Image: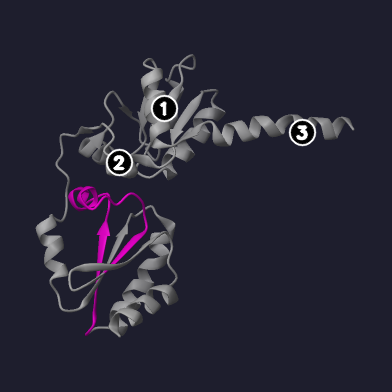
């Protein structure tokens, strides 16, 4: 009976940690406004941080050699608000920070969706790299179908889908163009099209979007949409 009571005593705490500390962009913005003394931390690379970031944020690269040392220098008496590009790295960073005794609130969906939702942020000193919208629209003028894959190097589903996309391009050489766009390097296109997550697929026919898909798409699913579009 004692063991059973102890087990149930931990359930509310666990639920609180997994829900109350993972915030939507709107909740994160409100928390930011209500906690002016909070430590705002961007855990992306320095290059990403320079392109765009939240006002007042400090840059502690979660994959950098100095990350643990930098975290140890944070003030444990003040809460931490942490974010990255789409939520994955910030989740890992938040878990580590909590283990060090910090109170951490994490932006669940990351800067990618934050920008798409027109939440306030600052442009960095480095311009958004990569493809312009003129170049992007140039692909769409093709008489072939155009399958655009929005991805990121750290995204496991993106890496899994990449060879499937290559195989589809080889299978339909006369009917399909596959365009792979790294969302971290092509800020202009990502922002203009309001792409808010990866992987994200857009299939075009005659310059019009005929199919979109968010998240992992099996090869058979993509192939079925291509076949449908070719009829």
Name the mark on residue 117.
2
The label shown at residue 81 is: 1
**Numbered badge on residue 8:** 3
Q: Position of residue 226 (x, y in %)?
A: 33, 78
The extreme right residue here reads 1
Res 176 seen here: yes
Mark 1 to mark 2 CA distance (whole Å)? 19 Å
Q: Provide residue 171's location: percent of width, then percent of height.
A: 31, 84
Whether tag 1 and tag 3 are in contact, CB under 8 A, the answer is no
**183 relative to 108, above or below:** below
Mark 2 Cα within 10 Å, few/some/many (few <14, many 20+)? some
The quarter of the picture where residue 64 lies is top left
Q: Which residues are magenta?
A: 174-203
Instruction: Identify the disc placed on residue 211.
Output: none
Q: Are marks 1 and 2 in contact (CB under 8 Å)?
A: no
Residue 136 vs 96, above or below: the answer is below
Crowding at label 3, few (<14), some or many (≥20) Cα neighbours within 10 Å? Answer: few
Local SS, label 1: strand
Which mark is first along the chain, 3 or 1?
3
In this rendering, the answer to whether 190 lies above or below 104 is: below
Q: In the figure, is residue 148 to the left or right of 136?
A: right
Residue at the spot x=38%, y=78% of the render? 223
Q: How far separated are the C-alphas under marks 1 and 3?
A: 29 Å
Q: Nearer the viewer, mark 1 or mark 3?
A: 3
């Amino acid at each position: 009976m004692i063991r059973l009571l102890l087990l149930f005593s931990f359930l509310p705490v666990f639920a609180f940690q997994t829900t109350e500390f993972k915030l939507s962009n709107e909740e994160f913005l409100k928390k930011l406004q209500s906690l002016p003394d909070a430590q705002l931390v961007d855990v992306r690379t320095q290059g990403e941080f320079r392109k765009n970031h939240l006002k007042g944020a400090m840059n502690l690269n979660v994959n950098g050699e100095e990350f643990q040392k930098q975290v140890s220098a944070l003030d444990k008496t003040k809460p931490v608000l942490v974010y990255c590009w789409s939520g994955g790295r910030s989740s890992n960073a938040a878990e580590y920070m909590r283990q060090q005794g910090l109170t951490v609130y994490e932006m669940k969906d990351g800067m990618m969706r934050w920008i798409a939702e027109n939440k306030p942020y600052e442009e960095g000193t480095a311009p958004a790299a990569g493809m312009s919208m003129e170049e992007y629209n140039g692909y769409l003028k093709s008489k072939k179908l155009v399958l655009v894959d929005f991805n990121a190097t750290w995204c496991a589903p993106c890496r899994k889908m990449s060879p499937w996309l290559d195989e589809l391009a080889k299978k339909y050489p006369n009917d399909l163009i596959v365009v792979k766009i790294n969302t971290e390097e092509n800020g202009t296109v990502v922002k203009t099209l309001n792409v808010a997550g990866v992987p994200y697929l857009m299939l075009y026919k005659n310059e019009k979007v005929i199919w979109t898909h968010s998240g992992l798409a099996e090869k058979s699913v993509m192939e079925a949409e291509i076949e449908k579009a070719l009829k």
